[in-house]
Amino acid sequence: MAAITAALVKELREMTGAGMMDCKKALSATDGDMDKAVEFLREKGLAAAAKKAGRIAAEGLVTAKVEGKKAVIVEVNSETDFVAKNAEFQQYVADVASQIFNGGAATIEELMAEPWAPDTSLTVEQALSEKIARIGEKLSIRRFAKIEAENGMVVAYIHGGGRIGVLVEAETEAADNAEAAEAVKNIAMQIAALRPQYISRADVPADFIEKETEILRAQIMNDPKEAAKPEKVINGMIQGRIAKELKEFCLSDQPYVKAEDGKQTVAQYLAQVSKAVGADITLKNFVRFETGEGIQKKEEDFAAEVAKQMNM
């Protein structure tokens, strides 16, 4: 029997797209014969993911699970929106959220190595391979986050049937108050709609301000009319433009979207609710996932494809 080396396992994994443990088992079962190991994986349905490995999975779902002061949010991708609306896929995503909630994984790699809760004879990675073979599309557990509130609450908001998901942690002594919980839910909706990057200006990194200052100064210097102004005026212009940007980036400074007059900020809204419930509500953390965010989607030119086929 040939020695089952790490290099051999790696080679088989790259050839088939199957999980590491599956490749090791296949090689052991076939005495290290690479061709037979590939057949072994194909027979088990575990090499089906190989043909899909190069595809782009930019659709899918974001879901969250909240119990008490603990919450998780996860994005699982598929290739098509059709699969994202499939009940089997939706149940799978819910199972992944439960796996993360109840497990101890801090990274995708750690998650993949865990025993799959619905069937502990499989790892999470093996269960994913089986699901890919069954559904017939490339699927990917892309990212997840966990929040556990020490003193307060965690609220989840899922928008557009799973297109956008948000978790918000708030510190408050009014965690059991319905009005306070509704306020934090409203903030989660605000985050979904307006994509803030930070809670307040205090959270903005100094290097971000420095970089923006450089960019804005360069813009001014490239405008002969503005560049001719006194240095004090130019500095004031830069500070004013940065302040305007921070109102968009910082959640607390954003106009509260449900305000009737459109002038109330999120910070002012929370202060209003805090006074009404008799306890401060302080935003501590938030996570916003949008399905396919940052993934380059393949754009098909149907006319060009037809022309290509006709010329073949």
Image: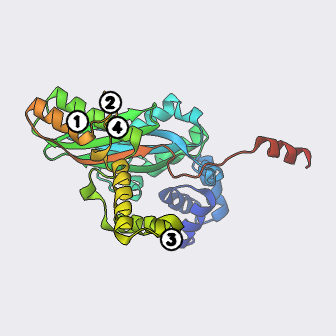
Closer to us: mark 2 or mark 4? 2
Compare marks 3 and 4 and give the one earlier in the sequence.
3
Closer to us: mark 3 or mark 4? 4
In front of the other: 7 or 171: 171
* Whole-number angstrom distance, CA of label 1 to CA of label 3: 58 Å
Mark 2 neighbour class, 10 Å CA radius: few under 14, some 14 to 19, many 20 or more: some
Q: Which residue is mark 2?
A: 258
Q: How is the image coloured?
A: rainbow
User: Residue 165: in sight, yes or no?
Assistant: no
Residue 175 in the image, given as x and y percentages of width and height: 14, 35
Q: Quadrant of residue 178?
A: top left
SS type, badge 4: helix
In front of the other: 231 or 7: 231
Mark 1 neighbour class, 10 Å CA radius: few under 14, some 14 to 19, many 20 or more: some
Mark 1: which amino acid? Tyr
Quadrant housing the N terminus: bottom right
Residue drawn at the location 62% of the way across and 47% of the way down = 43
Q: Quadrant of residue 279?
A: top left
Question: Which mark is drawn over residue 6?
Answer: 3
Q: Are marks 2 and 4 in contact (CB under 8 Å)?
A: yes
Closer to us: mark 1 or mark 3? 1
* Whole-number angstrom distance, CA of label 2 to CA of label 3: 57 Å
Q: Which residue is mark 4?
A: 190
Question: Which mark is drawn over residue 269?
Answer: 1
Residue drawn at the location 68% of the way across and 47% of the way down = 299
Closer to us: mark 4 or mark 1? 1
Compare marks 2 and 3 and give the one earlier in the sequence.
3
Instruction: Give above or below for 186 relative to 139.
Output: above
